[in-house]
Amino acid sequence: MKGKHRVGMKMTPQRMAIMKYLEGNTDHPSAADVFKSVSRRFPTMSFATVYNTLQTLKDKGHLLELSIDPDKKRFDANPTSHHHLICVSCRRIVDVTRTFNLALPEDERYKFQLIGTHVDFYGICPECRNRHSEQKPGRRR
């Protein structure tokens, strides 16, 4: 999120703190995650301030809103085209920057003009696999 002064909104200390938290953040945080972190420095800041700032940044193209997690919206501070790898157990999201050459056959486009693709991969991260194997009784290593 480079060019903090060129995001098209008044820069308050709270908004600057939100943007600093997001800059380089690859955790794909929810609004609640951002609020929890930033409110330590600004205890009087409201959740609405965080949410509205995230929405404004999204509307101006500085953030992506992910609907990957059915329990909460997540935000991606990297608005460039990329894909995601999602753990189905803990909901961890990892960026995948590799380009995939996907071709949708003409008869399956329903006359849509394609403007892009996004691929989501699902799996179980190493931490969840290890945690799961440690919980099984009587399992030898």
Image (cartoon, rainbow, N blue to C red):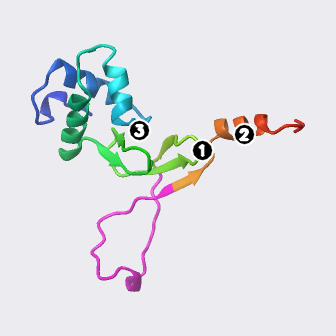
Is residue 65 something one can see in this rendering?
yes
75 displayed left or right of 132: left
Mark drawn on residue 28: 3
Identity, as a three-letter code, of the amino acid under mark 2 = His
Q: Is residue 61 above or below residue 99?
A: above
Q: Nearer the viewer, residue 66 or 107?
A: 66
Which residue is the site of mark 1? 89
State yes or no: residue 112 in magenta: yes
> Distance between the Cα atoms at labels 2 and 3?
24 Å
Q: Quadrant of the C terminus?
A: top right
Image quarter for residue 129?
top right
In the figure, 31 relative to 86: above or below? above
Assign the N terminus to one quadrant of the image.
top left
**Quadrant of the rendered structure where residue 14 is?**
top left
Q: Residue at x 19, y 28 (%)?
A: 4
Would you say the residues marked 2 and 1 are in contact, meaning their CB atoms lie under 8 Å apart? yes
Residue on which the image places disc 2: 132
Q: CA distance from mark 2 to mark 1?
A: 10 Å
**In x, y percent, where is residue 6?**
13, 33
Specify the amino acid type for callout 1.
Answer: Ser
Q: Are marks 1 and 3 in contact (CB under 8 Å)?
A: no
Measured as percent of width and height from the top left, residue 9 is found at 11, 33
Indicate the position of residue 127 as horizontal and vertical percent values. Answer: 65, 35
Q: Which residues make up the magenta segment?
A: 98-120
Q: Main secondary structure of the magenta part?
A: loop
